[in-house]
Image (cartoon, grey):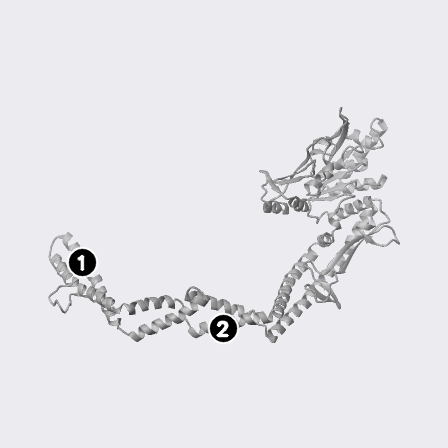
Amino acid sequence: MHIQGLGVIDSATLELHSGLTVVTGETGAGKTMVVTGLHLLSGGRADSSRVRSGAQRAVVEGRFVTTAESGAAEVAGEAGAEPDEDGSLIAVRSVSSQGRSRAHLGGRSVPNTVLAELADQVLAVHGQNDQLRLLRADEQRAALDRFAGEAVEQPLAEYRRLRREWLEVVRELSERSQRSRELEREADLLRHGLSEIEAADPAPGEDTELVDRARRLSDIDQLRELATGAHTAISGSDADDPDGAGAMSLVGQARRLLGSSEDPKLREIGDRLSEAAAVLSDAGTELSDYLEELQADPAELERVLARQAQLKQLTKKYAEDIDGVLEWAERSRDTLRGMDTSEEALAELAARRDSLAAELVEHARELSRIRTEAAGRLAAAVTEELTGLAMAQAEFEVSVSSRHATAGGHETVVLDGKPVHAGPDGVDEVEMRLRAHRGAPALPIQKGASGGELSRVMLGLEVVLADSDTVPTLVFDEVDAGVGGRAAVEIGRRLARLGRTHQVVVVTHLPQVAAYADRHLVVDKATETAGLTHSDVRTVSDEQRVTELARMLAGLDSTETGRAHAEELLEVADRYKADF
């Protein structure tokens, strides 16, 4: 991530480790600008007051490593963004000193909401002032389902399939009931049209055939003259010229003359004349048959014209030709079958609706049972984590209850005699609560915990959900607020474990936490000649890291005791990380 002109940071590039990265520095050095930068990349609200004094704009650029099958790649594809050659996505957010904000993804200008959608797939920021992802009711339900794993997947898929079928029947029944008069009028029109078509009983392509037949009957004298002349030319049997030779006779004469020759070439031509004679014979026969069928019948012409007029009435109303009329009739029959508003049809639909609703309730009940069982295990696991995070008296609870609805609502079913809302994920409302100490009421986690406690609750949740959490990067800002001693060491260890399955970024002031980092970034503060404060970000290791940890130990960087303590912290952390 590259930051420019943001707060006290003039220009800095952060190389984040794929495991645990910690960010440390003196108070006021600008550590939180790292989290602010991530917020901007996540589509968060742009605040011109964050722009560095004297700078025209603040710019944050981040490179996200994704896969072609990931949700982030799907978001980028829908926005028209293109990944780099290595498959990574570059996101850029700029904020001017006047407050104007711009966002880019994969080289394309995009709305801030696109960056927010991308962040939902790749990033979760936990801090004291954040609207945390896991504070949303739908995310709490989704987190519980991830924790339940395979036990909830198949029942939930079956519930959703059944719910879609039930909603379709509910919709159809409602539409038929509310539009019964309108549908009946439409049905009458369709039935009238079908009756008219069935009375005419047209055959496929009949209108085209009638056009040809009418033309033939209208031009019968001319057609007979043409056919007779052609037949005479072939056969030579003209009564006015009995001695006239037809084509058949002339070809036969030529064939006989050539056949008497010994010349191979002439005999070959004679064979070809034999083929011509066969063709002429077939043509003469067909012309004779045509003339026999060609009978002048005024009554037949009248019948054809009347039939054409009848079919013309259909093509004027329903389609351009008879084939289209027949297709309209077939569609109309299908439509009529779905427009039955009789009492019997409505009663049948209502029975189907009630049957599906009863089946849906049983699936919802099974989902609730699975979630309630998983909620108990999740609550116990997070409570255990909180014990090691300096919240030994706290108890974490996960409540699973039915979401009440008004009877008769669009998505309402009756469960145990009460109307409940049958949403796409079941009838359950999931709420995570915190009991600060024994005897205290269990409150929603955003109300039952202080800022620092809330971050630790989020950390405990993330540790428990690590194997099932789909967000690859987790950011914790001041997760260790108000913590010290042994609890600080436990936080460091949990973050280190979390860093084995996720990319974790932590802003911390505790050396016990920083000692467990895979990469340690330090934000240094300096004062320029003009009086402006600026900060740089650097990666520390070996002796520099010992010095930074010693500084964090109450400013003991210049003492041998402080450095020895820092070295001991690193040794303990390295031994712990080597064991997993």
- For badge 2, the amino acid type reads His
- For badge 1, the amino acid type reads Leu
Q: Position of residue 191 (x, y in %)?
A: 51, 72
- Secondary element under disc 2, as helix, strand or loop, is helix
As drawn, the label of residue 176 is none
Return the residue nearer the eye: 101 or 119. Answer: 101
In this figure, which residue is indicated by the disc labeled 2?
A: 192
Q: Position of residue 261 (x, y in %)?
A: 11, 55
Residue 215 position by quadrant: bottom left
Decide which of tag 1 and tag 2 comes sooner along the chain. 2
- Secondary element under disc 1, as helix, strand or loop, is helix
Return the residue nearer the eye: 338 or 301. Answer: 301
As drawn, the label of residue 273 is 1
Q: Residue furthest right?
A: 439
Residue 319 position by quadrant: bottom left
Foreground tag (1 vs 2):
2
Q: Position of residue 457 (x, y in %)?
A: 79, 47
Q: Is residue 47 above or below residue 184?
A: above
Local packing at callout 1 (Cα closer than 10 Å; few below 14, some 14-19, many 20+) is some
